[in-house]
Image (cartoon, rainbow, N blue to C red):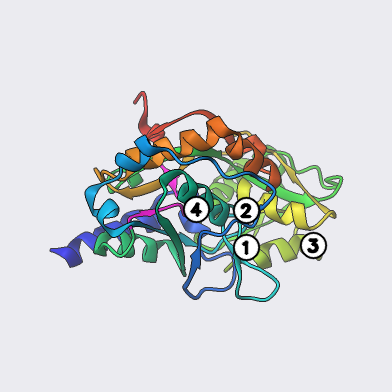
Amino acid sequence: MARKIIRSIIWGTATAGILALTACSAGGGGSSAASATPSAAQIPLTPFSQSIHDSLPPSVLAAGKLNLVSIVLPPYAYFGADGKTLQGLNVDMAAQMKSILGIDVTLQTVPAIADVATGLASGKFDASISPQSDMASTEATFSFADWLAEYVVFLVEKGNPKGVTSLDTTCGKTIATLQGGTAETVLKQASTDCQTAGKPAVVINTFADQNTAVLAVQSGRADAAFSSQIPLSYFVETDPTLELAGTNQLNGFPKFYVGAYALKGSPVVSPMLATLQAMKASGAYTALLNSYGISANAIDPFGLNLGTAGQ
């Protein structure tokens, strides 16, 4: 039965959500554990909350530890210049959670989103703060405490010389994207639409990981890359010759949210939401998003399972 559950989870996460499909794009595929030590040290830690601490599941309280997991994907989690020190937004979030909850919080990285699902199903991890989109298909397996909005956008050369601003402007352009991802499917439909309108097809170049897709733009082999806004924002922050285009618009995708998540119905999700809300009230949430250049992805208010709210 356990095997069946794990297979079901892996299939669901592998086929749903653009963030799941970018999970292998960061490089550095091995697993790693990290203590919740902040890398954005200038941002004050949110104070301890006895009420949120007391709302944690008895199993977590008894262990005195909350075990979190994430894939390696900038800016959420990535390794520093030494190749060993884990950094990123999720490391800073874990440090904030440790302060608020008053218990040890560990963050372990795994190679792929399917490994997150397997770890949650086996009980190895209590929850994930890995980038995973909250949609009807993922809510079939997980419960979410949503704290970010996500979009799929274009990464272009500074000044956007090829004028790629939307799917309508990709006709005849060379666009880099991840092989087998939902973004590739959307680009194929855009190419069909171009040809139906009597315009040149989109030249779609696919790559196994995000780094090589971005390199195609940097080297002039592609006019733009098409992928998730938050990871692409990281590349813009680290390379002044790049910029984003078509931001904060749907670009062929439904609106979706990103959240901390655990197995469907897990009692840890509500305390996770309360912890995130405490970060927002203290100003740490806004400061962290600003420090990683993703303030445009902030949402207000946070909520449970916003992907299907109102449906």
> Mark 1 and 3 residues: CB-CB less than 8 Å, in contact?
no
Instruction: Give the extent of the magenta segment.
Output: 126-135
Q: Mark 3 points at which residue?
A: 218
Residues at marks 4 and 3, CA–CA distance in whole angstroms? 33 Å
**Count of marks placed on residues:** 4
Residue 306 percent across, percent down from the top left: 40, 32
Q: Mark 1 points at which residue?
A: 210
Position of 215 with respect to 251 (left or right) is: right
Q: Mark 2 points at which residue?
A: 231
Q: Name the residue under label 4.
A: 94
> Mark 1 and 4 residues: CB-CB less than 8 Å, in contact?
no
Q: Which is nearer the N-term, disc 4 or disc 2?
A: 4
The foreground one among 38 and 110 is 38
> Mark 1 and 2 residues: CB-CB less than 8 Å, in contact?
yes
- At 28% from the left and 49% from the top, the residue drawn is 141
* CA neighbours of label 2 inside 10 A, class few (<14), some (14 to 19), many (20+): many
Which amino acid type is marked by label 1? Gln
Residues at marks 3 and 2, CA–CA distance in whole angstroms? 16 Å
Q: Does the magenta stretch include residue 182?
A: no
> Mark 3 and 2 residues: CB-CB less than 8 Å, in contact?
no
- At 25% from the left and 64% from the top, the residue drawn is 122
Residues at marks 4 and 2, CA–CA distance in whole angstroms? 19 Å
